[in-house]
Image: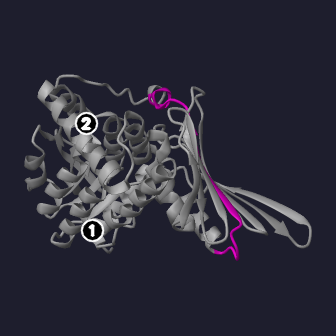
Amino acid sequence: MASQQQTPILRVGIIGCGEITQVAHIPNLNFLSHRYQTTYLCDISQQALEHCARKVQGGAPKTTADAAELCSSPDVDVVVIANADAYHVEHGLLALKNDKYTLIEKPASVCFRDLDLLVEAEKKSKGKVMVGTMRRFATAFTDAVKEVGGMEKIQYARVRDIIGPNSTFVDQSGTFPLKFSDYSDADTKDRLKRETDISEQALAKEFGVPVTPDSQLMLRLLGGLGTHDLSAMREIIGMPKSVAGACLTFPGIFSVLFKYDDFPVTYESGFSKVPQFDAHIEVYSPEKIVRVDFDTPYVKGLPVTVTIRELIGNDGFQERKVRKTYQDPYTIEFLELYDCVVNGKAPKTSALDARNDIELFKMILRADSSRYQ
């Protein structure tokens, strides 16, 4: 009887023990114990480290407050960066310096200056960057990309992400995350200083947009929720030529009109108090309409579906709603990361690819920059 080929177990170090690590990353890595083992945790909160260490299965992970210690450890093959956005690039550079593959939670960065540091560091490293835009790994989404690719002509597309409070979904997820505050004033001041520097770099120096509390808030929204929508939009229909108009009424719900070669695309996003998750991309052609619907990623196993409506014959109609799997995008993302590390596959959500998201942030904010005068 032939022996089954041994598959390597990748040792994971996680930087940042906050909500997304507690709700998604540690549980999913535990389920993927045939591929991964969490061996190291890093956070500035000792209480968060202790709490998350108890959640890890398969052995107690080492803990540290020093990201450099984790990234240089021989006990770590892959680094997951899930801490405050302002530290994503710095810690990504540490991972690459130590030739480690790294999954960086979105946004990798919201300014060109910092993202380009990652792109250049990759060229000198054996490691690679995968940006955590997990919707793009959903089976229904990749199926939708193929369906849209077969269209003769796109007439119109709509990208929507209008959702209720994330806290509602998290509280009902059954993962029981905790928040901790045992960090120093110096840590808080350092984060705020970095966030201010990044905002001024992006808005004033790179985008030519006034730096105000509202423009900074809009930039954070685009980097957070918006990255999911815009990154997926780029993959399914490509980059727009320009922004025809934007009404950036946030807080609340805002709208953007993108201009492509011969069709328009509307992008609408924001938050409401209604606890629903209305996130979809819908693409229209003369004979076919393709729609992919996403649900909250904070509740494991909720399906991502693709719906195809099309002309049959001269005047017939067919509608198909397809759910191929309950396997969630975070799980598929980690399986894709495994393939990249073990088999040398290039990550599609690379640092260089993420540069296009910043281009879109720039286009959107400049289109309604008079709002911030």
| Badge 2 density bin: few <14, some 14–19, many ≥20, Cα 10 Å | many
User: From the image, which quarter does the N terminus lie in?
Assistant: bottom left
Farthest residue, direction top: 181
Name the residue beneath numbered marker 1.
342
Q: Nearer the viewer, residue 334 or 158?
A: 158
Residue 213 highlighted magenta (yes or no): no
Choose top left, top right, bottom left or bottom right for residue 25.
top left
**311 relative to 22 in the view: left or right:** right
Q: What amino acid type is highlighted by mark number 1?
A: Val
Q: CA distance from mark 2 to mark 1?
A: 26 Å
**94 relative to 169 in the view: left or right:** left
Q: Which residues are magenta?
A: 150-170
Residue 33 image offset from top left, x and y in percent: 30, 50
Q: Nearer the viewer, residue 9 or 124?
A: 124
Choose top left, top right, bottom left or bottom right for residue 151.
bottom right
Choose top left, top right, bottom left or bottom right for residue 30.
top left
Q: Earlier in the sequence, mark 2 or mark 1?
A: 2
Residue found at x 44% / y 40% = 372
Q: Secondary structure at mark 1?
A: helix
Residue found at x 12% / y 29% = 186
Q: What amino acid type is highlighted by mark number 2?
A: Cys
Label at residue 17: 2
Residue 359 image offset from top left, x and y in percent: 41, 60
